[in-house]
Image (cartoon, rainbow, N blue to C red):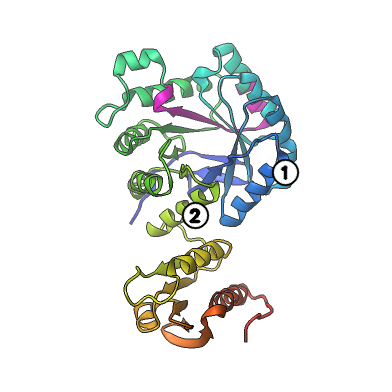
Amino acid sequence: MIVRRKTRRITLGDVGIGGDSPISVQSMTNTDTSDVAATVAQIQELQKAGCELIRVAVPDKNAAHALRAIRDAISIPLIADIHFDYRLAIAAMEHGAQGIRVNPGNLGGSEKLGQVVDAATMHGVPIRVGVNSGSVEKDLLEKYGYPTTESPRSLIESAMRNVGYLEKRNFHDLKISIKASDVLTTISAYRQLADTTDYPLHIGVTEAGGLIGGTVKSSVALGILLFEGIGDTFRISLTRPPVEEVRVGFELLRSLKIRERGPELISCPTCGRTGIDLFGLAEKVEEFVQTMKSPLKVAVMGCVVNGPGEAKEADIGVAGGKGTGIIFKKGKIFKKVDESELMEVFLAELQQMEFDRRGESAFRTSS
């Protein structure tokens, strides 16, 4: 059984972080933030996938000024990502940012940092003190060396030094992240940080990589930390469309039995009996179930011979053959369908089950 580390609780918009709040999944847009339409469209897609907090880059005034229109069009808290220019942090909060991420050490000194903290206090905006292994101050690198698995102290000292700057101004509405691109360094650093402070922690592996490499690295590091009760919110960083970060994030939480959102998809590996495009079928079903909320178990199997038996615990499943396929429920054949109609009919059945579970009605597009 996982026992979460006890942390302070902060509130970002209407989402609690830390304390007894659920571990939240977040992502970051890759659009030009000043392009309101494109940014809103991407955030809305992320919302459908379950994203609970969204961060946007604010590299200039145009991006900062666009935040109000973006916030008005979405329904999850909006976080502004700031680097180097303290004025952008203030402008972002003035234009509706509900949270900001900064590395206080690169904002230009205590006076400028003080203005950011004053603005955050006035607007009721939490701050994430975010330190990456590549942005540790030179004096700490000279004292402790570059962060490694054996010695991540420079990362931790950087974070806590910057937290101290905020605490001196009586600001405590914050969370902390200390990210590295190395899995073992990330784990070691967060373990030590968790023993150092009770502020909520944003965990993650920075610059993790593409879909396969990034998913593996993030899942190993974050999976170990979450299993040990460390982490209050996280982002899976992938060089992929942001919606895939959210999908991986919720699958990670599901695998640890921490949280479940929507259906669980199971599918068989291909073999010589596979008579359909199983890869394409599984991919389309996986994409569809991301929009569902009911905790169904959905199976996609490669052949009609073993499909219902191997996935008999699934609430609903599909198995293909040459020219025909079957839809089964709880191990029993529910319907035989021509291969050309299999996807359409199966998705309609999934949608109907979703409506039934939620006590709604839907028009069946299949017979």
Mark 1 element type:
helix
Displayed quadrant of residue 342: bottom right
Name the residue rendered at 55%, 78% in the picture: 340
Q: Nearer the viewer, residue 6 or 68?
A: 68
Q: Is residue 299 above or below residue 5?
A: below
Judge depth for marks 2 and 1 and give the one in front.
1
Which callout, 2 or 1, points at the residue further toward the start of the chain?
Answer: 1
Q: CA distance from mark 2 to mark 1?
A: 23 Å
Q: What x and y, as percent, mark residue 4?
A: 39, 48
Q: Disc 2 residue type?
A: Arg
Name the residue rendered at 36%, 16% in the picture: 140
CB-based contact (under 8 Å), mark 2 and mark 1: no
User: Is 38 within the magenta?
Assistant: no
Q: Is residue 89 above or below residue 250?
A: above
Residue 197 appears in the picture as rendered? yes
Tell whether 198 sits left or right of 59.
left
Assign the C terminus to one quadrant of the image. Answer: bottom right
Q: What x and y, as percent, mark residue 120?
A: 63, 27
User: Is 133 within the magenta?
Assistant: yes
Q: Disc 1 residue type?
A: Ala
Q: What x and y, as percent, mark residue 72?
A: 74, 43
Which dot marks residue 247? 2
Residue 168 appears in the picture as rendered? no
Assign the N terminus to one quadrant of the image. Answer: bottom left
Provide the residue span drawn in magenta.
Answer: 117-135
Which dot marks residue 37? 1
Q: Nearer the viewer, residue 299 or 129?
A: 299
Q: Is residue 346 above or below residue 220?
A: below
Tell whether 14 sits left or right of 253.
right
Name the residue rendered at 40%, 69% in the picture: 267
Which dot marks residue 115? none
Q: What x and y, as percent, mark residue 152?
A: 31, 27
